[in-house]
Image (cartoon, grey):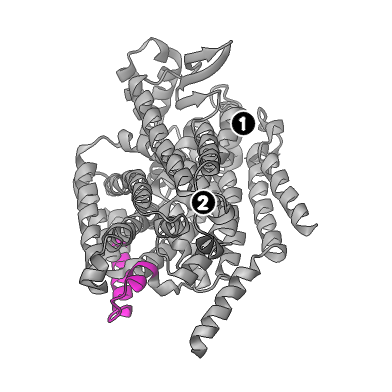
Amino acid sequence: MIPAIVVFLYLATVLYIGIFAFRRARGKEEAEDYFLASRSLGPFVFLFSLFGTNMTAFAILGSSGHAFSNGIVTFGLMASSSGLVIPLSIFFIGTRVWALGKKYGFMTPVQMFRDRWECGHIGTVIFAVQAVLLVPYIIIGIMGGGTTLNAISGGAVPYWFGGAIVAMVVMSYVFFGGMRGTAWVNTFQTVLFLLFGAIALIVIGVGMGGFTNAVQAIASSPALAPLLTRERISPYYFFSYTFIPLSAIAFPHILIFCLTARKMSQFKKTVIFYPLCILAIWLPCVFLGVMANRATDVPQIRAKQEARRVLATQGRTMEPEARDDLREKAAGDDVILLLLQRYAPLWLAGLLGAGIMAAVMASDSQILALSTMFTEDVFAYYGHKARFGAGVQVLTGRVFIVIITLFAYVVALRAPETIFELAIQYAFSGFAALSPLLVAALFWKGSTKWGALACTVWTASAVAAVAIFQQTVPAPAPGPSIVMWSLGGTEVLSRTPGGTAVFGFMPVVPMVIVSALLMIVVSKVTPKPKATTLSRYF
Amino acid sequence: MKKILLALAVVALYILHQDIWFWRTAYPLVFGFIPIGLFYQACFSVAASLLMWLLVKFAWPAHLEREIEERSSGEDAA
């Protein structure tokens, strides 16, 4: 119970930060202050909150779980490629969006697209696609909170109650603190996780009797040795994954965060330190995920390894449902929590659990971004701000936060988690496929609203098609994939154990390429915006 | 010229991420416990940070910054 008490103290601190931010903002009823902290974040808060916004439960718990099953490849696949692509996109796109926001007062990406391409309802279509892709994140954040509190308290806090507590805390500090509260909480959470990630590595390493012995033991086991190499993942898949971080800058909550910097120079430290922050957080998570395979004295970890073994040896002859059941049993998303319970003293397990809660609760900025988008792109755009005033606009944003959190909580209680994990996979690919919108808007005079619409409709259709395909064709057992369509001996479309492959690549590759091509081809044959509009951008 | 070199550095680093040469081996183990493939990708992250430093130093879009500063000083004067 001690770890759970430490976590509750942490939640109380986070709540206090949000309310403190509310008191700082008292008297300011402008939307820009509530949704963007008056574009006034300093360099330290800007770096850590932007980084923290990207570090979700999926990133932290998912990375160690992925490493537990697939080995060290997880770091190159998800972390180091992000360490290159995300800062590059912030450098080239984030700085420009910040400057345009300062110049013309934009608060959301859709406001910029509407102005840049002289469009109205096409902007609403982009808003709708962004919102649909973002909602699963909020749901999975609440699910992660419930699961983590349940695990840390040893089952004393039931899942429904844990989820409710996390939902209430996040909703409260976003409701009261707006962007200022969210940014401060994110900064606190990132610092916490950076500190405790290193401590966890040392404590677990000592507990396991040193990593040298553990690594030697893994290397000498024929079943585990591949985890120290990358042979479980194909080079095509590895290459495909470098397209996924393109999604970061296209996520509305990241782009909106770019608008909160006080000065453009604050981007300098952010882009330089971003890869190092990724290294500091992901390296311990991935390494511990692999090392968890040596913690065979933990019964739950032994059960996961057994499920993995059965899946590999008998999976091909099983019914799809039985295979999915085994896959769930073999999943390693909770291995870090299990290692902490086994090797860390109780009070430290509580502190480290609080660090993990920090990552799990990253859905705050997505909730705020959705509220900002709704109030600016729908409420204000369709004339309600002019009619009711800025005060009502902020109030609408707050009410929206309550509604979306309650909705997410109710769905989190009723739906199986795996559905939303899949939805998040699609969301990454979807936002990556939307990234040509930003590149075209900022760097290509010839782009048009019809090109933007084609790109958006394609993204929505492709995400839906992949989702339907994966729901219709069950995943095969580990090993060769199911070829659904081949042309002249070349595999065009396959169902793989982990998802879908198109010409051997992840779907994100053709999605981004086709999206960019549609933007180019459709823009070439449709009328451009007026010269006066273009002169505002180029 | 500077910008071309920086663009080449970005492309080179992207290619270097696809390190197929350490695909099937864990050895040598750096410091006795870090598989070489993981160590390489950790070094890659440091290299990415250095590249970003070079971009900030030599390709910073200062014109955007100036434009905003001039605009806000104009607004302050008005």
**Which residue position holds label 2?**
A528
Residue numbers of the magenta segment? A11-36
Type of the residue with mark 1: Thr
Task: Give the answer, above or below, for where A7 lies relative to A395.
Answer: above
**Quadrant position of the C terminus of chain A in the picture:** bottom right
Query: Relative to the observer, which residue lies in front, A500 or A30?
Result: A30
**Magenta stretch contains residue A249:** no
Q: Residue furthest bottom?
A: B77
Is residue A58 left or right of A375 when viewed as pictured? right
Establish if A428 lies above or below A98. above
Judging by the rendered image, the residue that carries numbered circle 1 is A229
Residue A527 locus on image (x, y percent):
50, 48
Disc 1 crowd, CA 10 A, few/some/many (<14, 14-19, 20+): many
Give residue A207's position: percent from left, percent from top.
49, 45
**Does any portion of residue A190 appear in the rendered image?**
no
Report helix, strand or loop for mark 1.
loop
Q: Residue at x 57, y 78 (%)?
A: B69
Q: Specify the quadrant of the image occupied by residue A296.
A: top left
Where does residue A346 sit, x and y in percent of width and height?
36, 53
Q: Nearer the viewer, residue A293 or A240?
A: A240
Looking at the image, residue A492 sits to the left or right of residue A352; the answer is right
Q: x, y percentage for residue A441?
A: 52, 53
Please give the chain letter of the residue carrying mark 1.
Answer: A
Alpha carbon of mark 1 to alpha carbon of mark 2: how far? 51 Å
**Element type at mark 2:** loop
**Residue pictured at 24% horizontal, 48% vertical:** A408
Is residue A15 magenta-colored?
yes
Q: Main secondary structure of the magenta part?
A: helix
Using the rendered image of the protein, determine whether residue A42 is visible from the camera's viewpoint. yes
Using the rendered image, report if marks 1 and 2 lie on a common chain.
yes
The residue at 32%/70% (across/down) is A31
The residue at the point 66 percent across, 58 percent down is B52
